[in-house]
């Protein structure tokens, strides 16, 4: 039992102190300005296409809320 505890403790210590097997971050970003411009253009296209969809979504929810509130006021006024 004592040897198992000692083995587990040494294994845990080795796992903590051992370096991670991750990719090296020593290299720097070496892509050119044109690549960054292209990625920025792609991001701009995505955002521009999302704007009308978001406006439409807000318009639909606003209309649904107006209809719901008008129905609620009709129901409450008919109960009085």
Image (cartoon, rainbow, N blue to C red):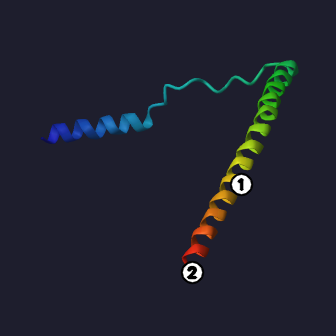
Residue closer to the observer: 49 or 25: 49
The correct choice, above or below, for 10 with respect to 26 in the image is: below
The correct choice, above or below, for 78 with respect to 29 in the image is: below
Does 47 sit left or right of 74 as displayed?
Answer: right
Residue closer to the observer: 37 or 79: 79
Query: Where the N terminus falls, by quadrant?
Result: top left
Does 18 sit left or right of 11 as displayed?
Answer: right
For residue 40, what is the image quadrant?
top right
**Which percent across, then down, holds residue 56?**
75, 42
The secondary element bearing badge 2 is classed as loop
Q: CA distance from mark 2 to mark 1?
A: 27 Å
Query: Where the C terminus falls, by quadrant?
Result: bottom right
For residue 53, what is the image quadrant?
top right
Residue closer to the observer: 65 or 29: 65
Q: Earlier in the sequence, mark 2 or mark 1?
A: 1
Q: Residues within 10 Å of mark 2 (few under 14, many from 20)?
A: few
Query: Residue at (74%, 48%) from the top-left corner?
Result: 59
Q: Nearer the viewer, mark 2 or mark 1?
A: 2
In the rendered structure, find residue 80 and report the number of the disc placed on it: 2
**Which percent across, then down, holds residue 5?**
20, 41
Residue beneath label 1, please?
A: 62
**Which percent across, then down, holds residue 54?**
74, 42
The secondary element bearing badge 1 is classed as helix
Does 6 sit left or right of 66 as displayed?
Answer: left
Query: Residue at (24%, 35%) from the top-left corner?
Result: 7
**Which percent across, then down, holds residue 15?**
39, 34
Q: Residues within 10 Å of mark 1 (few under 14, many from 20)?
A: few
Query: Residue at (71%, 53%) from the top-left corner?
Result: 63
Q: Residue furthest left?
A: 1
Query: Residue at (66%, 64%) from the top-left corner?
Result: 70
In the rendered structure, find residue 39 and report the number of the disc placed on it: none
The correct choice, above or below, for 73 with respect to 45 in the image is: below
């Amino acid at each position: 039992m004592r040897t198992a505890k000692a083995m587990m403790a040494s294994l845990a210590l080795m796992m903590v102190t051992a370096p991670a097997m991750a990719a090296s971050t020593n290299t720097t970003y070496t892509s050119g300005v044109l690549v960054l411009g292209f990625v920025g253009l792609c991001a701009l296209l995505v955002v521009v296409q999302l704007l009308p969809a978001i406006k439409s979504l807000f318009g639909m929810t606003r209309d649904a809320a107006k209809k719901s509130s008008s129905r609620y006021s009709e129901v409450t006024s008919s109960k009085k």
